[in-house]
Amino acid sequence: MTSIITGDIINSKDSSPQAWLATLKSVLNNFGNTPKQWEIYRGDSFQLEIPTTEALRASFLIKATIKQYKNLDVRLAIGIGDKTYASEKITESNGSAFVNSGECFEALKKTTLALKSPFESFDIQINIMLELAQLTTNYWTSTSANLVKIALENPQLNQKALAKKLNKTQGNISQGLKRAGFDELSKLLDYYKTQITTLC
């Protein structure tokens, strides 16, 4: 099993792509090479193939990366399933993971992050959790988003080490992570990883 994340940038037409495009590419580069593992197309849409256990963490990392820019956000659909055809370009590969990701993306209306897998009861549970998480994550300020991005990219760093890295006090980091709902987000990521490991 694999995961395909399909995404696009919300309000991309209101801001210059020079601002966010390089940052989006650098975060996608963490997960593989273009165009085999990820590709940006139609200017502001992208697809990424990623191990299933890492799909949710990657989605929140992409969201935090884009939310650093004022008025921008991202819609993300995680599709879990098989890959039955591997092309040199991810956008030309195929399988149920791609179909699930595409269908999930088309169904995104009021929500900006959802998941579709072969496991229906898991989908129902996790999508309720994701909607609840978005009550916080959709309202991250650029400062909160930047802090979450660095915390997600450096899971080995504690608050003291994060404070040193960002040249801030530990109190600032603690308050910032609390505002961003980082503890709850970490619990959600752990829950997702445990469940998906059992299912797959």
Image (cartoon, rainbow, N blue to C red):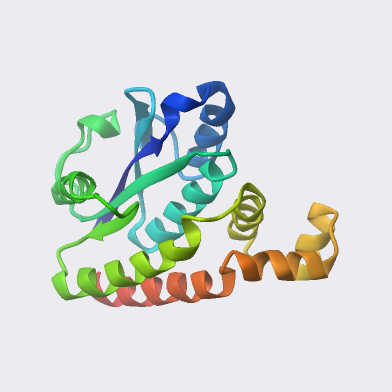
- Which image quarter is the N terminus in? bottom left
Above or below 169: residue 190: below
> Which residue is located at x 35 percent, y 72 percent?
129
Q: Is residue 92 visible?
A: yes
Residue 125 placement, left or right of 135: left
Q: Residue at x 28, y 67 (%)?
A: 127
Q: Residue at x 72, y 69 (%)?
A: 175
Q: Position of residue 58 (x, y in %)?
A: 45, 53
Tell me how many marks there are.
0
Of 184 and 92, which appears nearest the observer?
184
On the picture, is 101 further left or further right than 68? left
Residue 174, x across and y down, in percent? 73, 70
Q: Whole-percent x and y of residue 9?
A: 40, 36
Kindly tell me whether residue 157 is visible in this rendering: no
Q: Is residue 51 left or right of residue 164?
A: left
Residue at image position (38%, 23%) is: 43
Give the x, y percent position of residue 146: 64, 50
Q: Quadrant of the C terminus?
A: bottom left
